[in-house]
Image (tube, rainbow, N blue to C red):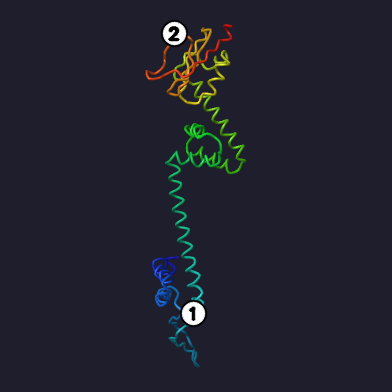
Amino acid sequence: MDVVFNGFWYKYIHALAAIPVYDWNLWNLMTSRVFPKVAKCEMFVYGPSGTPNVMDILCVLPLNILNEKIFAVLYVWFLFIALLATVNIVYRLLVICCPELRLQLLRTHLKGMPKAHVREVLASAGYGDWFVLMCVSINVNPSLFRELLEQLYAKLNQARCTDPVFAEQPSQQLPQLPHLQAKLERCPSRNCSLLIDPTADRHSICTVSSQRVMAVPTAPTINIMAPNDEIISMDIYYNESHA
């Protein structure tokens, strides 16, 4: 458009600036540079002998009176679209770069779900996973979407707790301690320390002040607590294979 109308973008902005101050002389001057109302024309007139004669005349272009107003509206519309596109680009960049913003946007579709649970789900998810979850949240019932996120949280939490930092027993042998496994599935933190001895007749689950949950064989010589940890609660479960 700038090429066709010979500098439309930088000329017409001056014409639009004249509208708020009611400077119609400036309006007519600037719009006439793009949409002239009167122009010089060359007309070929043939004489009695058939010889063409060129005549200079003034042509009136009444349609440009309408064009100048139509393109004034289009100019404002294009500026508005450019502003929206810029805002959208900035928004997308912020969403890509800020995990906390993705968390807050997803929580708007998860009323009642604890923030810590949503954070756990998004901790191992990238932008693509978040985008898929947002698309799902828009197209399903909020209660169903919340149930989906709760199931994802439970699966991720179970995977973290059964893939421990301290493991001397393969995870496939955990069903020997069904009560212990059920306890670990509800582990509220990703910091789960697991030390299972299949030969031990009982195990302890310790919840300590650093929000770690530890499952260890009950024996006085075992200590995998941090120096500043304090035991908040301890439950003892018996190994059914030794019962």
| Kind of element beneath mark 2 | loop
- Of the residues shown, which amino acid type is indicated by label 1? Leu
Q: Residue at x 43, y 82 (%)?
A: 40
Measured as percent of width and height from the top left, residue 42 is found at 44, 83
Where, by quadrant of the figure, is residue 143 drawn? top right
Per the model, the C-alpha gap separating discs 1 and 2 is: 101 Å
Q: Nearer the viewer, residue 166 or 103?
A: 103
Q: Residues within 10 Å of mark 1 (few under 14, many from 20)?
A: few
Measured as percent of width and height from the top left, residue 7 is found at 40, 68
Q: Nearer the viewer, residue 227 or 133?
A: 227
Measured as percent of width and height from the top left, residue 130 is found at 51, 39
The reply to whether the C-beta atoms of the residues labelled 1 and 2 are less than 8 Å apart is no
Above or below residue 53? Residue 62 is above
| Kind of element beneath mark 1 | loop
Measured as percent of width and height from the top left, residue 21 is found at 41, 72
The tag earlier along the polypeptide, 1 or 2, is 1
Q: Nearer the viewer, residue 74 or 211?
A: 211
Above or below residue 127? Residue 69 is below
Q: Residue furthest bottom?
A: 48
- Of the residues shown, which amino acid type is indicated by label 2? Pro
Q: Nearer the viewer, residue 35 or 17?
A: 17
Instruction: From the image, tell me which residue sits under label 2.
Output: 220
Q: Is the C terminus in the top left, top right, bottom left or bottom right quadrant?
A: top right
Where, by quadrant of the figure, is residue 57 drawn? bottom left
Q: Residue furthest left?
A: 227
Left or right relative to 112: residue 42: left
Marks 1, 2: nearer the viewer: 2
Point out which mark residue 61 bears: 1
- Count how many numbered circles sit on residues in the image: 2
